[in-house]
Image: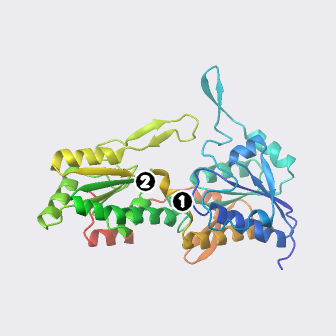
Amino acid sequence: MPAKTSIRRIGVLTGGGDCPGLNAVIRGVTKPAEDYGMTVYGIMDGFEGLVEGKAKELRNEDVSGILSRGGTILGSSNKGDPFHWPVEKDGKIIIEDRSEDVIKNYKAWNLDAIIAIGGDGTMHICKKLCDMGLKMIGVPKTIDNDLDATDVTFGHYSAVFVVSEALDRLHTTASSHHRVIVVEVMGRYAGWIALHGGLAGGADIILIPEIPFSWDSIFGKIHERELMGKKFSLVCVAEGARPKDGELVIKETDKKRTDPVRLGGIGKVVADRIETSTGKETRVTVLGHLQRGGSPTPYDRILSTKFGAFAIELAANMKFGRMVALKGDEIKNVKIEDAIANQKLVSEDNQALIAARRVGISFGD
């Protein structure tokens, strides 16, 4: 039985986009909390609930059976930044700072600390709230895997599994019809999903944000495969990939979001260009939110549980302003400001990238 702690009431929220493993973290926080004599309050809809005062007490029975469930029982939002709060006035979107409402609700609920589960945006908000005097602990979540302070974020390998399975299925239909099939996956500024998913799923060409691609290189790879008697090709492209001297393909902008740019459409651009330039019949599949949904893989269930249990341990030991992180095979903690200092991008010396090149995968460069 863990020693009792002076931390009595703790909030937990899931910020940003959803992903597999969120419920496993909530369970990993809530179940051990009782042993420490803590009461856990689930804050609804991410930081929106913290601004608008929406929360409910979580007990063991509330988190029973949610380990394998996708999404989040608390709800989430990627438009709830308290420092960038959208309000419609006279038909226009006005951005306000609602951080004082966060402080008010934190005090009204008599919280001693908050565990915030999220990615880069959530950790930036945590840092600002720490600077305002709130006791925050971060848990790294993002399918993009772009937080530099942890070896991996939970949710990433569940998304990679979806990409890999999709490529497996598309491989057979591409082969049957002698087509090129382009698969667009998530990854705004970091290409980890495309790299790992494409490598696991046997893609012939992988296009990632870190390596601007050449059209001629793509066409050359497809022609090379034709000469080898391989009449089909699979292309895995991250939504943030772009050609050399080209621009990102932007689907739309949304002023309500802290980062207003929504990417999407590079898959169709690549498919159209391949078909026009090579004469090969080409199709495009956009996986979109399939990568966020569904049950977490066993790996992510384990990692999420370890993250949640370690976060409540940090709270019990009054170690705030920290983010839990995977280092090797151990769970450690780092300062939140260190966690957001750099974005983790795919580098040329990454072993997965090197292995992909050695087995003949082209990155369009």
Q: Is residue 347 visible?
A: no
Image coordinates of residue 347 in percent, x first then y, are 39, 63
Does residue 116 sit above or below 84 in this rendering? below
The disc labelled 1 sits on which kind of residue?
Answer: Leu
Residue farthest to the top, as pictured? 90
Image coordinates of residue 41 in percent, x first then y, are 80, 56
Asked whether, in this view, residue 216 is left or right of residue 167, the answer is left
The disc labelled 2 sits on which kind of residue?
Answer: Leu
Q: Quadrant of residue 11?
A: bottom right
Q: Is residue 210 visible?
A: yes
Q: Which residue was labeled with disc 1?
A: 147
Label 2 crowd (10 A; few <14 / some 14-19 / many >=20): some
Q: Nearer the viewer, residue 136 or 202?
A: 202
Quadrant placement of the N terminus: bottom right
Q: Earlier in the sequence, mark 2 or mark 1?
A: 1
Residue located at (70% from left, 68% from top)? 28
